[in-house]
Amino acid sequence: MLFLLRGAFSIPLTFLEIAVFATLICAVDPVAVLCVFEDIHVNELLYICVFGESLLNDAVTIIILRV
């Protein structure tokens, strides 16, 4: 989606730059949510679901950066 909107930004971005940015955001987002979940003591099942998503995101990040 960001690749399709690249003309809307004042800085020209290549596909590789957009892929790296998306990969970094994909890996960091669930980690921030897990930190908040620990502070507010959410339901354990919800915590486990987000943790599982975080693990999958980490695997996808590694695969994308290797390509």
Image: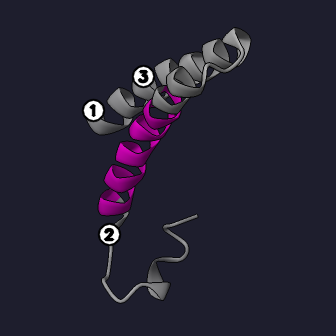
Mark 2 touches mark 1? (CB < 8 Å):
no
Q: Is residue 16 left or right of residue 32?
A: left
| Residue matched to label 1 | 66
* Residue 33 magenta-highlighted: yes
Amino acid at pointer 2: Thr
The percent position of residue 1, horizontal first and vertical second, equals 58, 64
User: Where is 60 relative to 12, above or below?
Assistant: above
Q: Position of residue 12 (x, y in %)?
A: 32, 82
Name the residue at the front extreme: 40
Instruction: Find residue 49 and report its horizontal and vertical position in percent.
Output: 66, 18
- Render colour scheme: one colour
Give the SS element for disc 3.
Answer: helix
> In the figure, residue 45 lies in which quadrant?
top right
Q: Secondary structure at mark 1?
A: helix
Near mark 1 (Cα within 10 A), the count class, few <14, some 14-19 or many ≥20, is few
- Which region is colored magenta? 16-34
Q: Residue at x 51, y 21 (%)?
A: 38
What residue is pinned by disc 3?
59
Percent position (x, y) of residue 61?
A: 38, 33
